[in-house]
Amino acid sequence: IISQSAKELQLDAYVIGGFVRDFILQRGSAKDIDIVAIGSGIELAKQVAKNLPNNPKVQVFKTYGTAMLRFEDIEIEFVGARKESYHKDSRNPIVENGTLEDDQNRRDFTINALALDLSEEKFGDLLDPFNGIQDLKNAIIRTPLNPDITYSDDPLRMMRAIRFATQLHFEIEEASLKAISKNNHRIEIITKERIVVELNKILESNKPSIGFLLLEKTGLLDYILPELTALKGIDEVEGQRHKDNFYHTLEVVDNISKKTDNLWLRWAALLHDIGKAPTKKFHKKIGWTFHGHEFKGSKMVYQLFKRLKMPLNDKMKFVQKLVLMSSRPIAIADDIATDSAVRRLVFDAGDHIEDLMTLCEADITTKNPVRFKKYHNNFKNVRKKIV
Ligand code: CTP
């Protein structure tokens, strides 16, 4: 129908971006389709709507020169091919009409610049000026232009590169990693909401540690979640060391991602130890302690959600509660639970007792083999009592 509509308007149209990438990777059925028209995207959208059986409503975004319509559960977005140039202090580009090549040039990654021809004569032909197919095969994230320009033009792309690397298990090419490290401070011009969208996608992937390690390596994490970088490092006093709570946290996040798709439980895993950096102390008699880190951590959850402009709703409270309680079942297991301690825990955790146990199990799995065995056995007993 799109092909026929383009023909009626005598313009060329292409499918481009994520749909083509995911189609080639055979990665589920895409719910977003991006169409680029050599001419007016808005006119093409209207023509397509006219030709569709249910004549869906076209939503027009005049300022962006784009239009969107929904067909069944698919969102189709139309844009006229454009040439973009950026100003240093803004994510909003100066836009001019352009050719398909101009439009492919402005895209973030070679694997997102692939286009399929929708004309009758060349239907399905692939237009791949930057060898994106090769990058898909080699599992590489690479920018069409000089990476310094791509990332500096639109710093959100630094997060996107890391997000795609995490979702697809791709490598980011060295020149890109360098450019991201160099431009990391420019993430500050991006709205918090967009950053959170990318963070959520990283957390929703099957191995979130890939993303957080890259965020750390490129220095982006310091700008976005400094509470996590503060957990890095191991101190040693009088021969006593504590574990590196940053890498420990990432292990817990990966463990929990194997057990649940619940995004908020994954957030709780990510933040479960953030109170440890500001409460860390060394005592001559007992060694390293993080006394009160649970309370501190739950307060920090609120501050962090607020700073990232995430809703301060029940989800936030859930994360807070889990951070506050996360070490309690482990502590109870350590002492081998008394019935009253278990009863108290079930009462305090309320409806979230199962989620809390899942988090603690993910935490326990990271312990060294000797402690793991002991904790795990005791923990299983606590669990039995709860059930
Ligand atoms: N794009 C870009 N720079 C951005 C955002 C998007 O160049 N900062 C381009 C890419 O070509 C991308 C397309 O716009 O493929 C569509 O963007 P979007 O829908 O956000 O991402 P997808 O690639 O479709 O991936 P996903 O649906 O997984 O987010």
Image: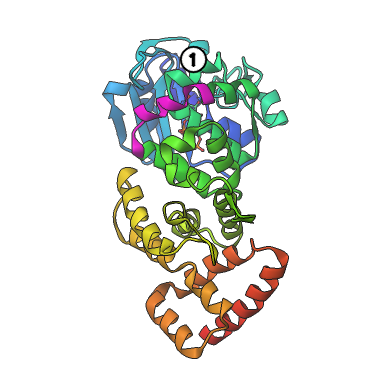
User: For residue 194: magenta?
Assistant: no
Q: Which residue is mark 1?
A: 149
Residue drawn 41% across the image and 29% down it: 187
Image-based side of 291 in relation to 126, left or right:
left
Residue at the (55%, 49%) spot, across then down: 246
Q: Position of residue 1 (x, y in %)?
A: 47, 30
Residue plotted at (48% across, 84% down): 342
Q: Is residue 72 visible?
A: no
Task: Provide the secondary structure element on which disc 1 rests.
Answer: helix
Instruction: Decide if residue 188 is on the left or right side of residue 369.
Output: left
- Which residues lie in the magenta part? 181-192
User: Residue 288 in the image: x percent, y percent?
Assistant: 53, 60
State yes or no: residue 190 in magenta: yes
The disc labelled 1 sits on which kind of residue? Ile
| Quarter where residue 43 is shown | top left
Q: Residue furthest bottom?
A: 339
Name the dominant secondary structure of the magenta segment.
helix
Describe residue 331's horizontal placement relative to residue 72 as left or right: right
